[in-house]
Image (cartoon, coloured by chain):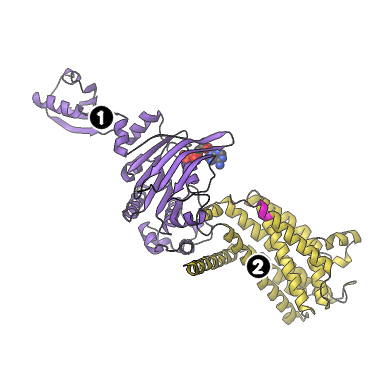
Chain colours: A purple, B yellow
Amino acid sequence: MPPVIEVRDLHKRYDDKIAVDDVSLTVQEGEIFGILGPNGAGKTTTVECVEGLRVPDRGEIRVLGLDPLRDRAELTRRLGVQLQAGHLPERLQVAEALELYGSFYPEPADWRALLDGLGLADKAKTRYAKLSGGQKQRLSIALALIGNPRVAILDELTTGLDPRARRDTWDLIEGVRSRGVTIVLVTHFMEEAERLCDRLALIDAGRVVMVDTPAGLTERARIEQRIQFRPSRPMDDHLLTSLPDVSGVTRRGESVIVNGNDNALNAVTTVLARNQIVAEQLRVEQASLEDAFVQLTGKRLEPGPR
Amino acid sequence: MSALHTAERGSATWRLIKAESTLCVRDKVAPLWGIGFPLVLLIILGSVSDLRQPVEGSGGLTYFDLYVPVLILFNLAILATTSLPTTLAGYRENGVLRRMRTTPVGPARVLAGQLVANFAIAVVAMVLFVAVAGLGFGVDLPKHLPGFALAWLLAAAALLAIGLLVAALAPGRGPATAIGTVLFFPMMFFAGLWIPISQMHPLLRDIAHYTPLGAGMGAFQDAYLGHFPSAVPLLTLTAYAVVCAFVAIRRFRWE
Ligand SMILES: Nc1ncnc2c1ncn2[C@@H]1O[C@H](COP(=O)(O)OP(=O)(O)O)[C@@H](O)[C@H]1O
Ligand SMILES: [Mg+2]
């Protein structure tokens, strides 16, 4: 099956600033593809080129086989877009906006169901200017889906939403995907990427660092595991430091903290069992995607979007 | 299939026009300053008996008779310098037009919707002013009605084109409002809001004839006196409409 989105050697600069240096991506039908990276990495510029809002300096882009610039009319019918900064007239009411935008598409979705799914049902008569930041965000998600698109590109999907609304939105997006819609998700939230994405592209400074599944990315970064427990009786650290899979042992109060590779947990529990020590309050911290990101780019993901 | 598409497009355009009209009314500038204020002015002026004296050099029309077309132009000027450019520049500033670029309908039809909405408000205002002046204060209808209609259409086209030009050139909503306000007062001066054109200093009178509202006033006055408007004001209005619309369309940016 041909890919739904294909980007090859994309390059885009603004005056003297290179926003996208060299980005290539393929997005397959039906997947949720994440684009992850710190602020200023070039995520928004990349997807806006795919949407046909920006003209790339170099590179090839195909969406459903269409050229975003030449085949605009056809593309806009099949592609749903949530812009990072997109707005509506201040005095337009929520329901009016959805009915209006629905009328632009050949087969619009049922806007009432969309509003329900996004927890906006009681805001149908509210003017855009009177909505909170999170409500505006949810409305813009609804508008991205109103045309029943085959592909949706969502830039900073849940930025500005509280944790509960964020989870509801994730549920909604999973529901949309289960109807076969291909979704590109730009995000700088690790939790969101881990929960929703089938594959992720890690973008940094205008380049794709790597593309993999969330688990694959974590694994590739070879992050150590961290095991924490309280031994049931006093024990010598040397019992653990001598294990080849363990790289370090520290103590915090009565707790022992062990760092090591994927096998460390196995090795540690075996040694403890052999010495009749019970590991109480055992906790294993899985390496997170966030750790992987820091490992791979040497940068932290910053909290605010741009 | 293609007929279906056309029908859908038609309904999208129609909905946009409806939405933009609703928004214009909710915005209050057009109904309040474009219709309400001049209407109140018309009623107050109509009650001042001193204004029922003929104005020298105006073919027998009284001061009050002249105020009717002046206030019709006042309405067009408010729409062109305040309502239209502020709204469109605000749409660009707030990303409304950019968002429309990602839909099958595109932002040009938002522009069209705004123009139609403002045009509709202008029609309502014009009919209302003429009717109130006629029924309430005994001002005769323009004696040359087709000439009046043509003059009004050209004046509306010129003024809306000027509004579009302001929206195209202003970098944001704030500058658009400022430019509009700066334009409004001299334009209204040359329409004869404060002194009838025929009473102006000859130099100012010559300038007035080539300003959009001065030309509009000239054409209206001809129609009120029963002539088809003369060529100079009609051509002046047409020139403003064509040139401003051309430059506006060339220079308009969606974001
Ligand atoms: N319109 C623009 N003009 C100039 N520079 C821009 C513009 N848009 C983005 N940039 C710059 O390009 C870089 C990439 O921006 P962007 O694509 O928005 O990144 P991201 O979405 O990953 O935060 C940033 O350094 C940003 O400052
Ligand atoms: Mg961004």
Between residues A282 and A295, which one lies in front from this camera angle? A295
Q: Where is residue A7 drawn, in percent x and y?
A: 44, 42
Q: Where is residue A182 drawn, in percent x and y?
A: 37, 50
- Residue in the picture at 29% in, 32% down: A219
Q: Secondary structure at mark 1?
A: strand
Q: Disc 2 marks which amino acid?
A: Phe
Query: Which portion, as a residue range, is magenta?
Result: B248-254
Q: Is residue A220 visible?
A: yes
Q: Where is residue A177 drawn, in percent x and y?
A: 34, 52
On the same chain: label 2 and label 1? no
Q: Disc 1 marks which amino acid?
A: Gln
**In this rendering, is residue A112 above or below A257?**
below
Task: Tell me: is circle 1 under 8 Å from ligand 1.
Answer: no
Q: Name the residue carrying label 2.
A: B119
Q: Name the residue carrying label 1.
A: A225
Q: Is residue A306 visible?
A: no
Q: Chain of mark 2?
A: B
* Residue B172 left/right relative to A196: right
